[in-house]
Image: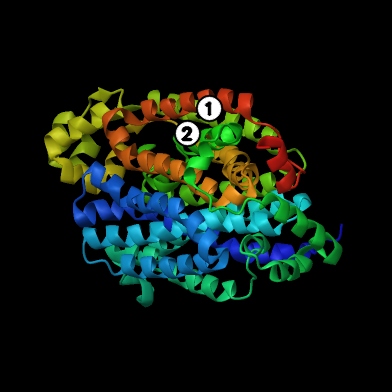
Amino acid sequence: MQVNTRYTTRVALVVAIGGFLMGFEASVISGVVTFLAAEFHLGQLELGWAVASLTLTATFAMMCAGPLSDRVGRRPVLMIAALLFMASAIAAAVAPDFATLVFARLVGGLAVGAALIVAPMYIAEISPASLRGRTVSLNQLNIVVGISAAFFSNYLILKLGHSALPLFSSLGDESWRAMLGIEALPALGYLVLLFTVPESPRWLAMHGRDDEARRVLERFCGREQSQRDLEAIRASLANRARPRIGELFHPSMRLVLTIGVTVAVLQQITGINAVFYYAPMIFEQSGIGTDASFMQAVLVGLVNLGFTLVAISQIDRLGRRPLLGFGLVGVAACMLLLAWGFGTATYTLDAADAARLSPALEPLAGETWHSDVEFRRAVIAVAGNDFWQGRQAEIVSAAIDANPGLILAGVLGFVASFAVSIGPVMWVLFSELFPNRLRGIAISFVGFINSAVSFSVQLVFPWELERIGNSATFLLYGLLAIAGLVVVMRVLPETNGRSLEELEAKLVG
């Protein structure tokens, strides 16, 4: 079979910039949360809302993006997403109050949901079976590049804001505005590049535009193969009735829907977005201070990127199922390691540190706490919540007796395990499992579930740290990973190396 690998890869890379913007938009907030808490005097649930509000509208957009792309095309929906990314970045950067910031995040969520659903769908529809795992994984790769870029951008802007350079030193406590606004530049570039890619050939065939579909297919796989692919697409689209969400619950869809929902829940319930969106906060809890916590967040992004590259290189060689099983074992083990690391920490303020931080803390000098929750409550009781919020990293750094290297290893191991498995594998599976005619609405449905779980995790994470503590929070994630591993390994077949139409015949019939 003649496959134009270079052209297919180029188009996939352009479309996958949507993944970069999604990763950047979602993770840039990690460097902003501590500034926001002080700037707008936020409680823990308000802080969680500032982070999770993006995911709320992303959840809505996921339900709408698939059907909308079935109606107007994959490329127009991606162009709309690019415009929304730009609008969100600019509005967040100039936000005068908390409500405006949340509104900007809500707008960004619409772009995230659209890009997250439509980009991998488009890439799967242009890619031959021999390349599909790698090309669809390019979207996940760009997501993690975007996450890494956000962590690095935050760290760089923070350091520049503390420098003596005239252009940047004026940022000061307003550094968070530059962190949020810089995304407008790549969003503009994405919009321009989308004009260079064709519409999905499968979408063209769905709308009776067979000649256009054939011409597009020829650019990807040559004339002879394009004719065979077009005939297979026509056969899978023989029933041209408008897809309805009720069809997802037909008995023939039971297996693929069970797999899709299970993987969608598992990817988020193990806490990946708690780590990505609150990385500096987690590292501050180990006592290393603000600047070091931002630097370690950069390491999170780099590990995520490196192991995503490993997944992409192996996903069409080893298959989806082995990668998923291996990675979930690592996810569970690392979360249990984090639970143990935080669970064995103690907190003691000596007299000198208490006097240096605030005279109000002197009654606590010499006492030892074995729980971060108890220590936090004791500090707030004598010094107040505003004092704790403003100087939390400094207080914890002075008091904690823990192994920050162990915490770092647990976080990096967790991210590596996620990135080599359920991170990229989930979106590849979503693009493969569902039949052509129902793919848009089906991916929107399972994407909605994935995003709803993500929203819940992000919203309650600061509250969990405050109420049940670091150790119990990570223990919960580890136990959920173990349960998910058992379920997924029982129901998931291997999908590697089969065309979308072959998988439809095998899994749905």
One can see residue 267 in this view: yes
Question: Which disc, if any, is residue 270?
Answer: 2
In the rendered structure, are the residues bearing label 1 and label 2 in contact, judged by CB atoms less than 8 Å apart?
A: yes
Q: Position of residue 22 (x, y in %)?
A: 48, 57
Based on the displayed image, in which of its 4 quarters is residue 413 positioned?
top right
- Quadrant location of the N terminus in the rendered image: bottom right
Quick check: 495 above or below 115?
above
Q: Residue at x 32, y 62 (%)?
A: 104
Is label 2 in a helix, a strand or a loop? loop
Question: Which disc, if any, is residue 248?
Answer: none
Query: Label 1, label 2: how many angstroms apart (C-alpha)?
Result: 9 Å
Q: Nearer the viewer, residue 18 or 277?
A: 18
- Please say which color scheme the image uses: rainbow
Give the residue at mark 1. Answer: 484
Q: Residue at x 28, y 60 (%)?
A: 103
Q: Position of residue 70 (x, y in %)?
A: 54, 59
